[in-house]
Amino acid sequence: MFNLPMLMHIPDGFLNAPVAGVMYVVAGIIVAVAVWQTNRTLNERTVPLMGVLGAFIFAAQMMNFPVAGGTSGHMLGGALAAILVGPWAAIVVMTSVIGVQALIFQDGGLAAMGANIFNMGILTAFVGFAVYWVASTIGRGNRRAVLGGTFAAAWLSVMIAAFATSAELAISGTSPWHVVLPAMMGVHALVGIGEGLISVGAVAFTLGTRPDLVRAPAVMATAPIRVSEERA
Amino acid sequence: MNRRNWVVLVAVGVGIGVFITLFSPWASSEPDGLERVAEDKGFIHEGKDAPYEVIADYVFPGVENERLATVLAGVVGVLIVTGISLGAGFGLWALSRSRAQRAGEGEEASGSHSGGDG
C-alpha cells in the first residue's frame, strides 16, 4: 500500500540540483557558525536542555495533528528551542533532529537535507528568537509577554519556513510562485496555530516547573527571567 | 546546576519524549501541509524514494504489530537524537571549559586541580 502519511519534509526530487546544492552550502556555513557560537556561549544550563529539546522535538514532530480539510500538520520546534537555549544551540539541536530524520527515518530527502535544515532548523530559530526577544523585552519579561511572544514566535517561524519552502520549489521549477506560495501560506497559517499552542504549552510547563530554565533573552547566559533588574 | 540535576533533567526530557511517542500510532495520518499542497498542485509525483531504508516511515522493521513498530521507531529516534544533541552540547561545553582553563590558568602548576565552577 502507498504509504502517504509520513512524508513530512521536502523529499528528493522536489528541488533541482542547483537549489539543493546552494541550500547545502548555506545551511552548512550557518550550522558551522552555530557550532562555533554554541561552543563560545554554552553554559551548564544549556547542555542538558539541548538533550531535552532533542528528545521533545523529535517526538513532537511525529505527532501530526489534524488541521482543516483532510490535512495534518506537525510541530517544527525551532522557535521553542531558540526561546529556551538561544538560536545557535537551537540550530545544533534542530540539525541533529532533521539529520537523524533524513538519514535513519527516510523523512526528508538526502539531497534536500540542506534545504530542510535551513527552512525548519535555521530560519525558525532566528525568526522565532527575534520575535520572542522583541515581545519579552517590550513586556519586560512578564509571564503574559513571554507566553504571547512564544506564540507569535512559533506561528511566524512556521510561516517563514513555508515561505522558504515555496521559494525553493518555485525556483526549482517544481511549481510556479503564484500557485505554490498562496497554497503553502494558507495551509501553514493553520499549522502555525498548532505550533504556537504546543510551544506555549511547553514554555508554560517549563515556567511552572523550572522557571530558572527560561531566561530573559537579552541576557541569555546570565539572569533568570522575572528577576527584576531594578533590584540589583 | 550540579551533575545530579543534569541527570534528572535529561531523564525527565527523555521520559516526556518517550511518553509522547506512545501516542504516535494515533497521530493524524492525513497528508501534512507540504504533502497536501504537492497533491493539490500536482507535483507529488516528482518525489523520489530514498536510496536506502533504515526505519523508513517511522515503522520499525521486522515488527508485525504496526502500532508497536511505530512506537519502537519513535523511542529509538528519541534516544538517538537525545544522544546526539546532548553529546554535541557536552562536547562543546567541555571543549570551551578546558580552553578557558588553559587560557586562564596557563601559568599555574598543572598538578593541582583548580575548581572552575561558577
Image: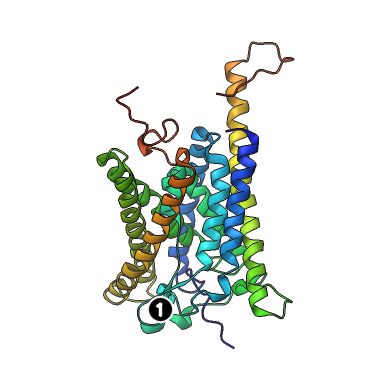
Q: Which chain does tag 1 point to?
A: A
Could one spot residue A122 in this view of the protein? no
Graded by Cα atoms within 10 Å as few (under 14), some (14 to 19) or many (20 or more), the crowding at tag 1 reads: many
Would you say A146 lies left or right of A52 here?
Answer: left
Which quadrant does the C terminus of chain A fall into?
A: top left
Q: Is residue A105 above or below residue A95?
A: below
Locate residue A74, reporting x and y percent.
Answer: 45, 67
Please name whichever residue, B5 or B80, is drawn nearer the observer in this view of the structure: B5
- Where residue A16 sits in the image (x, y, percent)? 45, 70
The N terminus of chain A: image quadrant: bottom right
Q: Is residue A52 visible?
A: yes
Tell me where residue A159 sits by quadrant: bottom left
Residue under the image location 32 percent in, 27 percent down: A229
Residue at 65 percent across and 79 percent down: it is B66
Residue corresponding to mark 1: A71
Q: Is residue A134 above or below residue A162?
A: above
- Which percent across, then down, holds residue A208? 44, 46
Across and down, in percent, residue B44 comes to 45, 81
Corner quadrant of residue B79: bottom right
Q: Is residue B76 left or right of residue A189?
A: right
Q: Which residue is at 52% across, 35% downward? A: A42
Q: Is B35 situated left or right of B61 in this image?
A: left
**Residue for point 61% across, 63% down:** A103
Q: Is residue B7 above or below residue A112?
A: above
Considering every residue shown, the one lying at the far front of the view is A208
Q: Amino acid at mark 1?
A: Thr
Report helix, strand or loop for mark 1.
Answer: strand
Quarter of the image where one finds residue B78? bottom right
